């Protein structure tokens, strides 16, 4: 197919994320990618600010990752995980148990982030069922959160941005605390925990878990909150016998400046979900990691097993490349790299603060956010970014970037100045 035929067939027959086929927005064909650059079918090159939705932390086509996939493909691309095991899964589990907060000991491999959240929620429900506290099956979360697109995950996404009204009567009704207002580097404000504390005090008899994104609320608003909030949630969960599920799918593997966002508060959740950057952006894989206590309680009561098992659970290709990606990260000086990106983003995005259309500019780790007063016009802003030679994909009022960690200062500065320039042009339109 030539590039025009490809795009024309795509327009008629393919559904893209959050898109309409009848009323399509521009879509670009990618021919290849390497390092921090995407190469389009028409020959143009774009500096990638998105790392393919937080995942391509080492950039594209990294030889170590490509090699891990090729080697494993020649040995065993897949085998069922029921009753069978293999070295890539065991190696990866060993690594994940070692690097996640101590106490997280049992790894359930899932095939996407949403599934790992669904698994975490089922674990929490089955835990209290097995413990004989069958009334504890509801969830408490915080507004502005995002936990995935399948129905049960949707029930704990922000009710407004998660479009709960479209699915009313279908989604279970859970409890939503006010979102934390105290910012990451603000002085801690004791009132910030009040809403969540009240809900947990009132409803702990019905609650199996609090589920939240630690420190960084991603797709629900790109907000960075205070580590003390997370510490206090941990303490409240302990006091009221409620499990804590930390959804680190976006934050895991260094993005917020620490290996895991939970490390900012030095807490161990009862269950942690990992995904996105787990395979360095090459294949779909996620993990739900739980404490031994959860497993022991579930196993002690009939049916005596945890009731979940995806067909492609523990896919050897995905496990092998995940192990290679995590090892690559651990062998690198990611902490210094991310500190440098943080500094570059702070400097590079600062001029956006002077634009009339901008409400806030914030940076944490390798995440840069420009929040606007009004929603962007995707039909004009997306081509404007491509014209400038950068790949940035805003949503709503948020223009944000989370570049691959290997991006050099020149590319970071170019990316930031392209964002400032496009926003200035757009606000003048
Ligand atoms: C992306 C994301 C998910 C969903 O992961 P998928 O792989 O898209 O299913 C869940 N939680 C958080 C915090 C995410 O950022």
Image: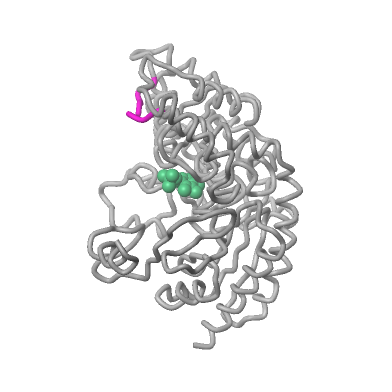
Q: Is residue 399 left or right of residue 189?
A: left
Quadrant of the image containing the N terminus: bottom left
User: Which residue: 59% across, 29% down?
Assistant: 96
Q: Quadrant of residue 285?
A: top left
Name above or below for residue 38 compared with residue 390. above
| Residue 208 visible from this viewpoint | yes
Q: Position of residue 307 (x, y in %)?
A: 35, 23
Q: Is residue 408 left or right of residue 284?
A: right
Q: Position of residue 298 (x, y in %)?
A: 43, 18
Q: Is residue 300 left or right of residue 198?
A: left
Q: Position of residue 364 (x, y in %)?
A: 67, 56
User: Which residue: 67% across, 51% down?
Assistant: 226
Q: Nearer the viewer, residue 142 or 400?
A: 400
The stretch in magenta equals 306-313
Q: Nearer the viewer, residue 289 or 204?
A: 289
Q: Position of residue 229 (x, y in %)?
A: 64, 46
| Residue 147 visible from this viewpoint | no
Name above or below for residue 294 compared with residue 250. above
Q: Quadrant of residue 313?
A: top left
């Amino acid at each position: 197919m030539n590039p025009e035929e490809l795009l024309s067939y795509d327009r008629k027959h393919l559904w893209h994320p959050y898109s309409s086929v009848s009323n399509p927005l521009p879509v670009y064909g990618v021919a290849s990618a390497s390092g921090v650059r995407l190469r389009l079918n028409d020959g143009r090159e774009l500096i990638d600010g998105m790392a393919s939705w937080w995942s391509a932390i080492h950039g594209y086509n990294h030889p170590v990752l490509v090699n891990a996939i090729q080697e494993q493909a020649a040995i065993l691309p897949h085998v069922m995980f029921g009753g069978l095991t293999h070295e890539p899964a065991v190696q990866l589990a060993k690594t994940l148990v070692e690097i996640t907060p101590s106490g997280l000991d049992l790894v359930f491999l899932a095939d996407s982030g949403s599934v790992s959240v669904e698994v975490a929620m089922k674990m929490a429900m089955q835990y209290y069922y097995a413990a004989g506290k069958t009334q504890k099956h509801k969830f408490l979360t915080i507004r502005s959160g995002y936990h995935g697109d399948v129905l049960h995950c949707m029930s704990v996404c922000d009710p407004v941005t998660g479009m709960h009204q479209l699915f009313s009567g279908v989604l279970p009704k859970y409890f939503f605390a006010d979102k934390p207002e105290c910012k990451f580097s603000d002085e801690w404000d004791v009132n910030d925990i009040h809403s969540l504390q009240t809900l947990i005090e009132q409803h702990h008899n019905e609650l199996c878990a609090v589920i939240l994104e630690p420190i960084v609320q991603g797709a629900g608003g790109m907000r960075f909150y205070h580590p003390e909030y997370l510490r206090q949630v941990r303490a409240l969960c302990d006091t009221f016998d409620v499990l804590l599920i930390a959804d680190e799918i976006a934050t895991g593997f260094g993005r917020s400046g620490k290996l895991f966002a939970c490390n900012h508060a030095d807490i161990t959740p009862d269950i942690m979900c990992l995904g996105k950057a787990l395979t360095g952006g090459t294949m779909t894989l996620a993990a739900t990691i739980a404490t031994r206590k959860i497993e022991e309680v579930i196993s002690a009561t009939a049916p005596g097993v945890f009731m979940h098992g995806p067909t492609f659970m523990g896919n050897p290709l995905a496990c092998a490349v995940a192990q290679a990606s995590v090892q690559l990260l651990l062998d690198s000086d990611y902490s210094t790299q991310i500190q440098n990106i943080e500094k570059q983003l702070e400097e590079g995005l600062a001029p956006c603060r002077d634009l009339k259309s901008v409400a806030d500019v914030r940076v944490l780790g390798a995440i840069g956010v420009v929040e606007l007063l009004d929603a962007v016009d995707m039909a004009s802003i997306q081509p404007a970014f491509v014209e400038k030679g950068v790949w940035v994909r805003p949503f709503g009022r948020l223009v944000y970037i989370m570049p691959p960690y290997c991006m050099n200062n020149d590319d970071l500065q170019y990316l930031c100045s392209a964002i400032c320039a496009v926003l200035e042009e757009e606000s003048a339109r």
